[in-house]
Image: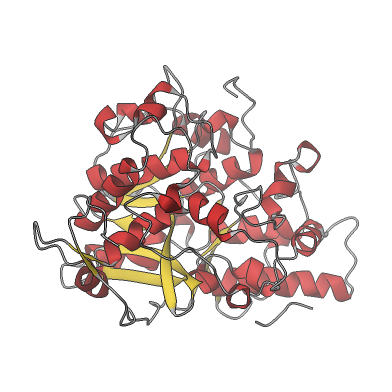
Amino acid sequence: MLDDKATARSTIVDIPVDVPKQYLPEGLPDGITLLSPDKLDHRTDAEIAAWLQKRHPVTSEKNIWGFWHNGFANMKPWTQRNVINWVRRLGPEWNVHIVDRLDGSETNVLNYVEESYFPKTFLEGTMDGHKAHMGDLVRLPLLWKYGGVWMDVGLILLRHVDDICWKRIEDPESPYELSAVALMHLPGTYTPLNGFLGTKSGNPFIKRWHDVYLALWEDGVTNATGFHKHPLLRHLPLFKPDMSTVNLEDDVNFDPEFFSDYVAHYLCGERIRKLVDPNDGFNGPEWYDKHMLIFDAADEMLYAQIITKWDVEKQFRLLSLKRSGEGAVVNEEWHEAEEFVNTLLAKTAMLKFPHGPGGEGLKVKMLADLWDADENRDKDHEEGTFAAYLRYGSVHFDQTREVKKLEWQNPKEETFTVGYLEPVQQ
């Protein structure tokens, strides 16, 4: 039972628009309603895929930003389907932009953002570390210049971004200016992640956050090794999460130095959160307390992992199980899969299936690793399976619950009065 608690162009994957009716339950589960079809984008998946590979103008702040270094066509099929379903679910009011670093590509990020926002290694193509760090260099400049919501391509959206955060961000009576999900990387302290970020353009926290991260890449640096020792970050504690807070066993192989380098982008945000700049008066703790709209990642992003204790084989097995049609057997495991998917559809805003840092950083196998494999290229939407039901529900179902802000105040922790690009003296 569930726990309580390459540059070469590849073939675009097409998804039938008319999902078989068997994915609609006879009676909708508690907490779920049907979404009105007039809110959806009704283009075919092939049409949406082709559109995503064209540069389209930024006409408002209702932008969804994502990145894949060698372009949408070279993304894994399951992540292509994620993005196509963002477009379909969000409808015509939102523009989805997937940018890349392909020379000659219409959607190259350098067609949107000036070179001054990036380090030499990014511009010259000499980065030799984890590909995720290219995305870390891209996300904040796009949000700073244009506004909108950043989403990692490994994310399945289950709620409209208006309901998650945007209505509160654009409301002139609301104090909120930046939305994120957060995880307890240190006891009592929730650290904003960067896989989902929503803000209007010109956000002062976003600009400082990116400037600090950009500074780490100076002087010929080509990868993130040793970032936790950088003069701008060395005063911050290493991330040593209590594994029980994310429902992981304590014996997981975990190297805090390796992991802190991998998520140095988070550490840069932590620097700004704890910093008071005497040069212009920017007060990070006060700004964060007043303007930050955060949600608990355990509830709103990583819920599938939490309720299965990160058992990737179980997640894969339940989602691959036949829900209807030939081969479907209604037994105990079928009911467990039904409960699993209905719980996700009703109780979490999004599903993030990351790959993780690899190496010694955090040795946990991920569902993304299984779905990446060629032999599993259709397992995330195979007809008649619970995975296909999840895909259908992510587009056609809505939730009745409110996505609630994480009620957490900054603890009385040490703050630093120093210029935001000046080292803290120790």
In this view, the residue farthest toward the front is 426
Q: Quadrant of the C terminus?
A: bottom left
Q: Residue at x 74, y 40 (%)?
A: 377
Q: Quadrant of the N terminus?
A: bottom right
Q: Quadrant of residue 146?
A: top left
Q: Compared to 337, does 226 lie above or below?
A: above
Q: Compared to 308, does 229 lie above or below?
A: above
**Residue 416 seen in the figure:** yes
State the residue in front, 272 or 376.
Answer: 272
Q: Position of residue 235 (x, y in %)?
A: 35, 62
In this view, the residue farthest toward the left is 280
Q: Residue at x 74, y 71 (%)?
A: 338
Q: Position of residue 171 (x, y in %)?
A: 21, 67
* Left or right relative to 168: residue 240: right
State the residue in front, 115 or 345.
Answer: 115
Q: Position of residue 334 (x, y in %)?
A: 83, 70
* Left or right relative to 290: residue 395: right
